[in-house]
Image: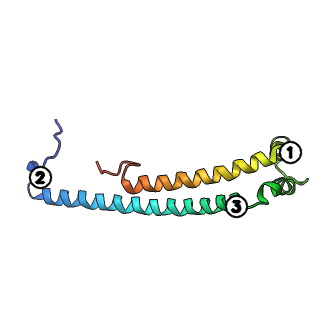
Amino acid sequence: MSIHPLHSETLGAAAPLAATTQEQARRLLSLTAWGVAMIEAILGYEWLLSALNKLSSQDYVRDFSPMLQQVILPGNPNDWWVSFMQRVVVPEAPQWARLVERSEFLVALGCFVGAVLWVSGCFPRLSPG
């Protein structure tokens, strides 16, 4: 028993139906890509607002260490996390604050690039079959 690929010649009257189904699949993938791109752009916008708020604030870097001190109060059930925060993050709080600012901006940029790639069809490849 051999299996042969289907061609339009072997389909006869079903060929227009197959072409219509492929076109519908392409449209669905296109709409899906636009939907994912919109969601990703909205998430990127939120990350960008958060990053810009931190970057424009004069108090964010200064207030980062006191904020962390409140988070690691005694009674926190995550001992390993409290230890990490006390030994690694709190002593270098200004550097960590700057890292958070820049990282949020880069996440926003990545979301916007991802949205553009989805719409352009470059990521992932949106051709059926």
Identify which amino acid the numbered label 3 is placed on: Ser
- Is 25 displayed left or right of 3 in the figure? right
Task: Decide: is 98 above or below 26.
Answer: above
Given residues 105 and 38, the one toward you in this image is: 105
Task: Tell me the number on the disc at residue 11.
Answer: 2
Find residue 30 and report its image quarter: bottom left
- Element under label 3? helix
Scheme of image coloration: rainbow
Residue at the image position 13 percent from the left and 56 percent from the top:
15
**Mark 1 vs mark 3, CA separation in Å:** 27 Å
- Percent x, y of residue 42: 53, 64
Q: Is 124 situated left or right of 24 in this image?
A: right
What residue did someone put label 3 on?
56
Kindly identify the residue that appears in the image at 87 percent across and 54 percent down: 69
Q: What kind of element bears circle 2?
A: helix
Q: Nearer the viewer, residue 55 or 76?
A: 55
Q: Tag 2: residue type?
A: Leu
Q: Residues within 10 Å of mark 3 (few under 14, many from 20)?
A: few
Tell me the residue that label 1 is attached to: 86
Could you tell me which secondary element the residue under label 1 belongs to?
A: helix
Task: Identify which residue, 2 or 106, lies in the foreground.
Answer: 106
| Residue 19 position within the rendered picture, expressed as x and y whole percent measured from the top left | 18, 57
